[in-house]
Image (cartoon, rainbow, N blue to C red):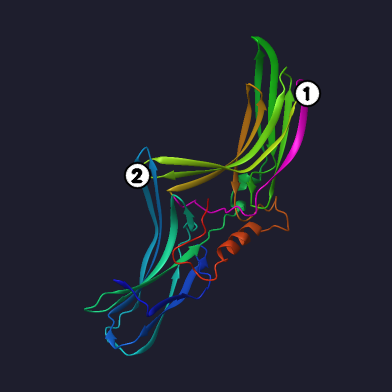
Amino acid sequence: MSVDENALLIFDKPTAIFMPGQIITGRVVYLSRNPLKISRVTIKFKGKCKISFTKLDNRYIGKQLYLKNEIALSCDKGESQVGKYVYPFNFRLPSFIPSTFVCKYGYIRYIAKVKICRPWKSDEITQSMFIVVSPINLNYVPLLSEPKCALKEKSYSLCCFLSGSMKLQANIPYSGFVPGQTIPVTVKLNNNSNVNVDYVIIRLERKWKISAQCKTTRKSDIVHKVINGTDRHTSKTRTVQIHIPNSLMVLDFKYCKVITETFTLHVEARVQALAGLKVAFNVMLGNVPLITASDPHQDNQAFQLTIQKYCSYKSVPTYSFPFVD
């Protein structure tokens, strides 16, 4: 098999960016420079995930197939004449496939491959990648619009004597957000002890779980904010705005068994030389904001930014996609 310089795969949509369930249309253009026999022209659509990583000197690999479909564009076994031949195609993507994705551990990738079969000669191949972007609509998860509250209380002792108790409470009005929005976190610290709270850390953490023969977890902080603590025998209530960066890429891994992604909001009161108090919320990040929580100026903003980021390419890349760190 060889890559055919005389064949060209063209998508009708120049950016070659599609959503699950959409119909891909296009054409294969073949330039015949010499009379030859073509027994068959086919196009194959394939989507797969491949992940690999090393742990304790062992190599682990995880794979998942989302799409594999071949369509015959021509079965004419006659001899072609010199000239240009055009083979149109259309194919509907499955409704339940994850977004295109690339990280240092692997990828989720979609490819269209054209094969031109010629008797007594090697098959000629041309291929092109296309991008799938699956929007995450937070309104499909009703529980996200409900408020959340987390509470933790702890007693402290100094020199074997009871020093009193401390109570940390955090509230968020809902738990579904999109990049560009802010998370209003209300922190109430009731310090009835003899120790001072040095500071309070609020951070939004992203966690990936990558599965092969075993699992590996990678965590990273998206937002990290520090506010003042509370002196002994005092109480404070503050509302802190945690801004989610517009540049954050949020992708849909719902149908991917190899990669899972979660977001957690942590609130921690730090006490010098002593164990502090921690509470946490699971939050969901998407592309389409909650109707009850959306700002009219940022409706669908995150999804549009995601599309713009993918569309920043003038043409479809052959070997590279946006890298998600």
Residue type, numbered disc 1: Thr
Is 198 in front, or is 182?
Answer: 198
Quadrant for residue 173, please give it.
top right
Q: Whole-Å distance between the Cαs marked 2 and 1?
A: 54 Å
Taking the spot 67% from the left edge, 53% from the top edge, the residue there is 180
The N terminus - image quarter: bottom left
Residue bearing mark 2 = 59
What residue lies at 76% left-to-right and 35% top-to-bottom? 238
In the figure, is residue 80 to the left or right of 287? left
How many marks are shown on the rendered structure?
A: 2
- The secondary structure type at the circle numbered 1 is strand
- Image quadrant where residue 224 sits: top right
The 10 Å Cα crowd at callout 2, few under 14, some 14 to 19, many 20 or more, is few
Magenta stretch mostly in which secondary structure?
A: loop
**Numbered disc 2: secondary structure:** strand
Query: Please, is residue 69 above or below residue 220 in the view?
Result: below
* Residue 316 pos. (x, y %): 49, 69
Q: Return the residue found at the far top.
A: 160
Q: Which residues are magenta?
A: 231-256
Dot in front, 2 or 1: 2
Residue 20 in the image, given as x and y percentages of width and height: 50, 62
